[in-house]
Amino acid sequence: MAGKPQHWKERNGRYSARVVIPPQLRPYLDNRTELEIQLGGDRRMALRNHAAAVASIQRQIGIARQKHEAATGKQASAPAYPLTVQQIAVRDYQSQIDFDTQLRATDHRYAQFEIDFDHARRYRDGFAGKLSDDELEELVGARLELARLAGNTDALKGTDKWRALAQALCVASYEAVAREDERNEGDFTGKPTHPLLADAAPTEDEPDPITFDNIIDDEVTRRARGKNAKPLPARTAKKYRDHCAAFAKWRKSKNALTVTAAEGKGWIESLQDAGELSNRTVKAMFQNLRTVLNWGRQNDPARFFPAGNPLNGIKTPDFTTTPSYLRAFTMDEAKLVLAAARKEQKAMFRWIPWLCAYSGMRVSEAGSLRKEDFFEVGGRWFWKVTTAGNRSLKTASSERRIPVHKALSDEGLLDFVKAAKAGRLFKGETKDEVSVQPRISTWVRGLIPFDKRPELSPNHGWRHLFEDFCRRDRVPEDARNYMTGRTDGGSQELYGRSEVMLPGLAAAMDQIQAIVIDNKD
């Protein structure tokens, strides 16, 4: 064997086929995360039976997928576990031979039945192209449907693709009947003679496709394992899935095992030529795709691109970076936005701009704040930026405590927090957890149109401005780095940071002069 097959599990000398269930399908399979079929302790027999076991599991998942599609009205854009026509035919042939072997081992009467040569000739006519689609469906339609249900094909009747697969299954059945006839005479040495099967690699030497979602699922599971695990945030996992899905759609295959360097280069160029995305975004998408392939190699270096990631070494797009001062709010813009926020009734528009202006927080961090994050020490109020409650932060250094600036207290922030119900402070109209970044960005652009200030970063601009406040008002660098969640990599960051430092941190915050807004009307 050329390596461990996909969906193969080995533990304590026992083998099994295991397939992870996509999250959206788990409710249709008793909320299980995976399906597994035991293959016994004989490795050779386990390898022989592995493909059939995986196909059986994939059909169960296929039924769940049908139910999900019926419930949501969404149709899959591509087969989940795509195989070539030859691969499907080889598997079908081998399953028929294995079934023949099993019957001969369990019932002596089976071998006494004569072969129906008239029926066999129908299979020959099928792969010779003499039969109509309806006749082919009558012969092999059920097995073709099993392949479709297993996610190995999306071929539809009436297409060339469907007819080619139906003819290939006729080859598999015709050759299987020939082996049965030989075995009835005691000859178990027969091999397929049709090129479709004769020229194919042995089934056990064909690794099952590894989809990009398979790799990401494994990485999500790996990072969540263990007592002090650091799970991959759901939003980050979705980003990787979306970018890999875009690549898979472009190359018309989800099989990560077949990615080539030429495809990687071609995808970059196609995204650039489309002119819809910036070079910076194209570079990020490609880097995320390359990262997923690296995860695949880390999980199975012997089989998954053993010679190395094919996307390594590909030149990514160059791009110009907008100077930091152009992305920041000017003082006049900051005053305009904060004054407009005073008039807002919706909490996220009323308070998130003010919180970011006086802390340098990321908008996503401010959007996930909860009432319980605010606390008082020595008569001074602070809030925590934390991962508690399944929240995610950009980096480990982003975990921090920030003093409430006097301008926020005067504005009434603490009164708002004290009056709020437990839980998230900034909720959606229909659900608690919402993505605030696009909402805040759109709101700001209503005040400062893109055509007037294209360089401005409506969300991140506060972070740039707060850094300048700290420089202007001589806030110590270590306090500035801590409050903004930045790191310089020094070993001192691993020590202390207890409540003892909070008064000094508050004193540093007090050095920042308030933004003077003409009125509060």
Image (cartoon, rainbow, N blue to C red):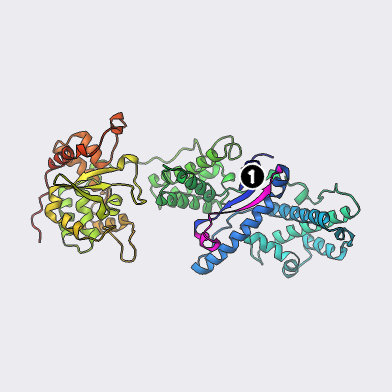
- Residue type, mark 1 in image: Pro
Q: As drawn, is 405 to the left or to the right of 291?
A: left
Q: How crowded is mark 1: few (under 14 residues within 10 Å), some or many (20 or more)?
A: many
Q: Which residue lies furthest to the bottom in this view?
A: 134
**In magenta stretch: residue 38:** yes
Q: Residue furthest right?
A: 185
Q: Which residue is drawn at 61% across and 54% down?
A: 82
Q: In which quarter of the image is residue 227?
A: top left
On screen, residue 14 above or below 135: above
Element carrying mark 1: loop
Q: As drawn, is 166 to the left or to the right of 493?
A: right
Q: As drawn, is 224 to the left or to the right of 254?
A: left
Circle 1 residue: 5
User: Residue 473: percent from the left, percent from the top?
Assistant: 13, 38
Q: Which residue is drawn at 19% across and 57% down?
A: 418
What is the tally of numbered marks visible in this picture? Answer: 1
Residue 27 versus residue 511: which sits nearer the camera?
Answer: 27
Q: Which residue is drawn at 74% across and 55% down?
A: 95
- The quarter of the picture where the N terminus appears is top right
User: Residue 198: percent from the left, percent from the top?
Assistant: 78, 48
- The quarter of the picture where the C terminus appears is bottom left
On screen, residue 12 above or below 253: above
User: Residue 128: percent from the left, percent from the top?
Assistant: 79, 60
Could one spot residue 506 in this view of the protein? yes
Q: What stretch is highlighted in magenta?
A: 24-42
On screen, residue 37 above or below 497: below
User: Residue 446: percent from the left, percent from the top?
Assistant: 24, 60
Could one spot residue 454 in this view of the protein? no
Q: Quadrant of residue 488?
A: top left
Q: As drawn, is 163 to the left or to the right of 400?
A: right
